[in-house]
Amino acid sequence: YHDPNCKDNRVAMVHLFEWKWNDIAAECERFLAPMGYCGVQVSPPNEHVIVDGYPWWQRYQPVSYKLESRSGNRQEFINMVERCNNVGIRIYVDAIINHMSGTGRSGKGSGGSDFDADEMHFPAVPYTIADFNGCGGCPACCCINSWTDVAQVRNCRLLGLTDLNQALPGVRQKIAGFLNDLIDIGVAGFRIDAGKHMWPADLKAISELTNDLNTKWFPAGRKAFFFYEVIDLAQVGEVRAQEYTGIGKVTEFRYCIKIDDVAGGLWGIHGLYDPGWGMVESTDAFVFVDNHDNQRGHGGGGNVVTYKNPRKYKVAQAVTLGYTYGHPRVMSSYEFTTDGQGPPANGDGSTKDVVINADGSCGNGWVCEHRWQAIAGMASFRKAVANANTIDNQRTEGNKVAFSRGGRGFVAISNEGSWSGTFQTGMPSGRYCNVIRGCPNSNGGCNGAEPVTVNSDGTASVSIADWDNPIFAIHVEAKA
Ligand code: LAG
Ligand code: CA
């Protein structure tokens, strides 16, 4: 349950937030596989409520486990999983299993199923009132309003969302049935939404009901990767991320604050993993610079760096993908100005296609951070150094840092103007491409810049001069 099930030494996950299944399938083939990404976190694939104006958060209110959502239908989902797995890219599902839709909602879901949340009537699963937590022990509204009352956090309604009782065998079976349907299709794992709001023992029992992964793409006996969304910002008396490390990896939200800090002052890189802050150990940590919630002030919010601050964002991603702490996920956003705004939409409300411009950037309102050369280049770097757990030759000078990764890669980042000189890269001699500028091309050179020569003693002449891309990175899988 801790192993992301990546192909070869691939590591980086990208969250293609609100993308349609057909667009994701194409992206696996044309970009993610060649750039060395491991997999994609997809938006919730299950049937959901439809809210006026189609805010993104409607997908966090399930109506059933039918695979009929704003991103596409069941057949399109199956095609995506097959096409991505066939090029070695894994699919991870955002699984909403804590709750169903919010109080006050009824009608038909995105797949046409009837439901009535006030009656706790979800016939397309089916769930009835008996499958939900009652209001006994909860405040009058049945909502969570004390975050230090751990039983209330787990057994009452998060934001008024009808709360499933995962202690019941029947509920466990239905949730496991949903996960097993996805596993049988070929997904590699799950982001468990609202993990904080479920008891770890119940989650453990559910994960133990899941099938082995599909042997068409995975070795026999493999289990799905589970990573639990637990917002732990070290508030005294609240649920701790460490309660979940026995059953999978856990989101480390303190990392978002740390990386924002470190990307502003690289001298602080030594403190990126800070046990004093209560952060979970590296092998348990699931890390990200920002996510779909905190980039818009939801889910804990806080000071996080996003695509709206591109230069700092690239620095933050270079540190995240270049360093050793945790398992990294890259956010891929759509442009937004208000927090509820849904994905780019056509006149009929359907989600717009992702279009790719001639220069490789995205159009139609999709930001595609994962395609920014600095970020994609660092995803390829992480694959190349995946087996190296060490940081060597680390050198910090004020707001600048350089380090190498076990003879397989070398990075330098300057947050204070240009930086040039002779550096010990720890790399074998040869001609390499600075993957922040571009990849090797078929003419024996590099796109975007001249090749870099590493001498037989491991030294190289390094220069960072581009204010908007203040990073230099070479690795053994990008030789000129
Ligand atoms: C999560 N992790 O634990 C998701 O990452 C987060 O995006 C989800 O909230 C949340 N848990 C529940 O799955 C999102 C929005 C909420 C939204 C909720 C349900 O951040 O704002 O709540 O999805 O759609 C909305 C309204 C609330 C209302 C609630 C129930 O914003 O005002 O109380 O619906 O009707
Ligand atoms: Ca709950």
Image (tube, helix red, strand yellow):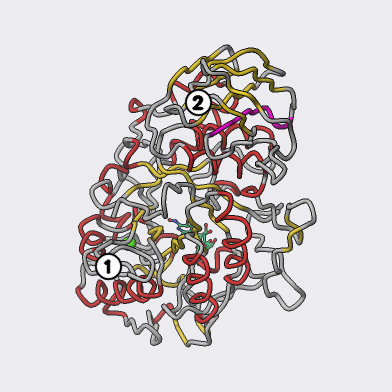
Residue position for label 1: 212
Q: Is residue 61 left or right of residue 149?
A: right
Residue at image coords 53%, 49%: 36
Figure quadrant of residue 318:
top right
Residue assigned mark 2: 428
Does the magenta run of residues contain 213? no
The span from disc 2 to disc 1 (Cα, nearest Å) is 40 Å
* Residue 408 in the image, given as x and y percentages of width and height: 47, 31
Which quadrant: the C terminus?
top right
Measuring from the top left, give residue 50's x and y in whole percent: 58, 76
Q: Is residue 127 left or right of residue 341?
A: left
Helix or strand or loop: what does disc 2 sit on?
A: loop
Residue 453 numbered tag: none
Magenta residues (range): 468-475
Q: Nearer the viewer, residue 451 or 135?
A: 451
Residue at 58%, 39% in the rendered image:
478
